[in-house]
Image: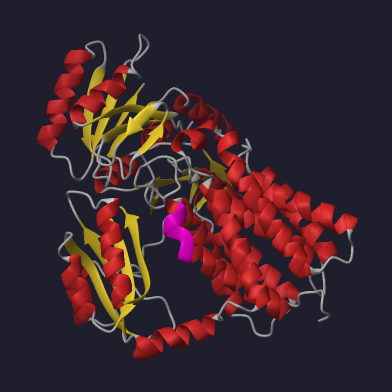
Amino acid sequence: MNSNSIDAALMAKMFLAGARNLEQKKEWINELNVFPVPDGDTGTNMTLTITSAADEVRKLDPLTMESVCKSISSGSLRGARGNSGVILSQLFRGCSKVWRNEPEITPANTARAFRKAVETAYKAVMKPKEGTILTVAKAGADITEELVTNNPDIEIEDLLKAVIDEMQRVLDLTPEMLPVLKEAGVVDSGGQGLVQIMKGCYNGFLGIDETEEEQEQELVRKYGYRTEFILKNPEHISVEQRLNFVSFMEEQGADVAAERCEEGLKVHINSDDPGAILTEALKYGYLSRIHVINNTERPQYPLHIFEENELEEAKADPKADPESAAEEEMPHKEVGFIAVSIGEGLGSIFRELGADSLIEGGQTMNPSTQDIMTAVDKVNADTVFIFPNNKNIILAAEQAQKLISDKRIIVVPTKTIPQGITALLNYLPEKSVEENEELMREEISCVKTVELTYAVRDTKIDEQTIHEGDIMGVGDHGIMAVGKEIDETALAALENMVDDESELISVYYGKDTSEEDAEALADRIREQFGDCEVEVAPGGQPIYYYIMSVE
């Protein structure tokens, strides 16, 4: 390697450094999300996406430009979660298309790689929006071309620093491009994630970032145990509580993470005293899926975390793994259906309507492209309809569609659970696949949805001031209502949705809402909207007290 180029080994080192920097900043990036809901956060989705690629890179031996590029591209494409993760994977894919055919990375081919990355990412999004990660990536490509054109002999170090500075400058301008960002007082979270990756890569280039092996050895040498668990709290774990708990854990060990999930917080930490961690956690709620791993005997494969009711069975039979139990092969059929859903009640509804496979996930846990591909593989059908049921999962489903060649995949762009239910209800076996797709798309366009949840932080959005703990009705295009009481907020949201054409209001109540409370709300809905039929069903979904639709 000459002084102004990057070989495969350094490229891998830089990429892993970028991944680590993103992982370290993910909670900060999560807090930039405009909507103050406990959702599948941008920082988490981007981190899971790049981690999938990083895992592939770590396995390489020997390292070549082609192998590193292929691992980054394929790993991120399959591991992509959420819109930000899919866009990130497409940026990596574009760069890889150029660099994999080069012996080394140079300023000249970097300009071509960055331009290809932006073109690839923009094509992946049906309606690209400026003021997002796309804009920040484009700024990096533009400045690279300009600098390399004006100075073909520019040093890579100078080029990288200038690119990061320009991307940061444009990132800071994103609130002026998207009013919703300006109103919330934040920059674009996806763009911030991309900048942090670039900064990590730059540190890796300069050699000021430890290698993954050094970090792992230091981690194991200092701390004997890795403790993992779910911290549940019916009263909701506030941002302040989470920060206090994280501060305590950081004093106790390293590699600390406390991420929101469907049930509360998913926690892991490396420390010498798991008991102290668990005792402190009990101050904030109750625990499940507790798993303590001895780092000195740490296996080199992913660990299955058992549910409480599975643990005794696993002890009785060490080989038992509830997720790998043999399944009866599904009989062949012409058309199959896959739905993304969370909650026992909603899962039952989809299965009753004909769903062959359910992918657990949704607003609080976006499945990866690989998760969707795995589900498709289990459905023994020539044509498979996929219902993402969340706007942040559609791109991952479409990416899976492009990667699958042995079956015909149709992604119906359902953005909510009620839209998915409506789509399945309107499937007609006697019609062709094309006719059914058209019918489903037409019918879901008539479904209006609102989800009742709580705010995880103070913010201002859609001209509404929201405080942590407020109840929000989140609709298809923004916040429909904000209040202090669940029922009052639900009724206020419906008031903004029901019109003279409305005929049916469906209410799916969550796992933290009783049937009695749901029926009481339904009675008030019938009283207020007498011309509409009202149906109530248990959804069992976490986080969201109610998911309601108007048709």
Residue sitting at 54 percent across and 50 percent down?
190
Magenta-highlighted stretch: main secondary structure?
Answer: helix
Residue sitting at 81 percent across and 57 percent down?
112
Q: Say if residue 431 shows up in the picture.
A: no
Is residue 27 one of those drawn in magenta? Answer: yes
Magenta stretch in the rendered image: 24-29
Residue at the extreme top of the image, as rendered:
500
The answer to whether 137 is drawn above or below residue 252 in the figure is above
The answer to whether 447 is drawn above or below residue 368 in the figure is above
Measured as percent of width and height from the top left, residue 261 is found at 32, 55
Q: Nearer the viewer, residue 263 or 235?
A: 235
The answer to whether 299 is drawn above or below residue 394 in the figure is below
Colour scheme shown: secondary structure
Marks counted in the figure total: 0
Measured as percent of width and height from the top left, residue 510 is found at 23, 41
Measured as percent of width and height from the top left, residue 25 is found at 47, 61
